[in-house]
Amino acid sequence: MKPAVDTKPVIPGDAAGTVGSLVGFRTLFYKEILRFWKVGFQTVAAPVLTALLYLLIFGHVLEDRVKVYDQITYTAFLVPGLVMMSVLQNAFANSSSSLIQSKITGNLVFVLLPPLSHWEMYGAYVLAATVRGLAVGCGVLVVTAWFAHLSFAHPGWILVFALVGAGVLGTLGLIAGILAEKFDQLAAFQNFLIMPATFLSGVFYSIHSLPPFWQAVSHANPFFYMIDGFRYGFFGVSDVPPLRSLLIMLAAFVTVAAIALHMLRTGFKLRH
């Protein structure tokens, strides 16, 4: 007599399904971390060097010519902006470049075939992008902090704005990677949207030094709130109350996350 075989299917949400799900998520996350870490000289060291060059050039030229907040030198004002700009740009670059490479080389099928939910794919890509953004940001902070006195007035705000900002840009990178079909389309997205938005977000200046029209334009740029709130964590002063900046960032994060999750759930431009 043959022994009875338990043929009960694994239903979503039970222990076995949860364990399998976590294994898939961890595997994809680990793969994304290795992808940028194996070329860390290009993905981490190069952005740190770029930010250092910005600091040396702008700090040297404008140190005695630009007045920002009281008792804060221009170089000190510049450091948090460069750190956050590096976090944002590299979080976007990680998720967007990973997805477009997988689409062009054809290995995206190995991500789509396993039973990964859209939540797991989203979490792995965005979390890995956040790790890269924070790694580059920490590198920039360590290198540039030697050139200015930073007070770290509110460390909690620093961490919150860095995490949420990296999450927003990692999600935007995922959306861009899904929409783009060629590298030049992704480059256009980065060069004509992400880079101008970060450069015009108050990294190199306080918006109070701008004419009223351009101040209003800056307030329409969500990247401004990321930079301004992050800078508040260092100096305790900002152009906009940090809680308002955080609420705007959270609203932006929920919006882009909903878009990205819908794209992944429906397989938009991923499953042909």
Image (cartoon, helix red, strand yellow):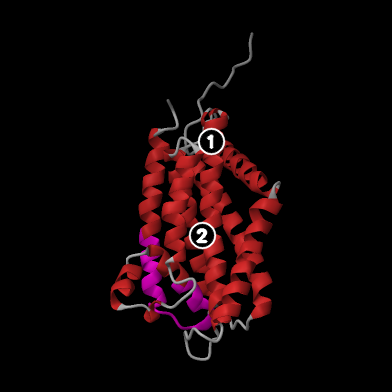
Vertical comparison of 129 with 216: above or below: above
> x and y percent of residue 172 in the render?
44, 50
- Amino acid type at image mark 2: Leu
Bounds of the magenta span? Answer: 228-251
- Marking on residue 57: none
Report crowding for label 1: few under 14, some 14 to 19, many 20 or more residues within 10 A (C-alpha): some
Screen quadrant of the C terminus: top left
Q: Is residue 47 left or right of residue 271?
A: right
Q: Earlier in the sequence, mark 1 or mark 2?
A: 1
Residue closest to the eye, 153 or 219: 219
Report crowding for label 2: few under 14, some 14 to 19, many 20 or more residues within 10 A (C-alpha): many
Screen quadrant of the N terminus: top right
- Amino acid type at image mark 1: Gly
> x and y percent of residue 217 in the render?
32, 68
Residue closest to the eye, 30 or 56: 56
- Marking on residue 17: 1
The residue drawn where x is 62% and y is 62% is 50
Main secondary structure found in the magenta portion? helix
Is 153 within the magenta? no
> x and y percent of residue 153 in the render?
54, 82
Vertical comparison of 39 with 213: above or below: above
Residue projecting furthest to the front: 61
Is 232 within the magenta? yes
Q: Which residue is mark 2?
A: 88
Vertical comparison of 43 with 28: above or below: below
Secondary structure at numbered mark 2:
helix
Secondary structure at numbered mark 1:
helix
Q: Is residue 110 visible?
A: no
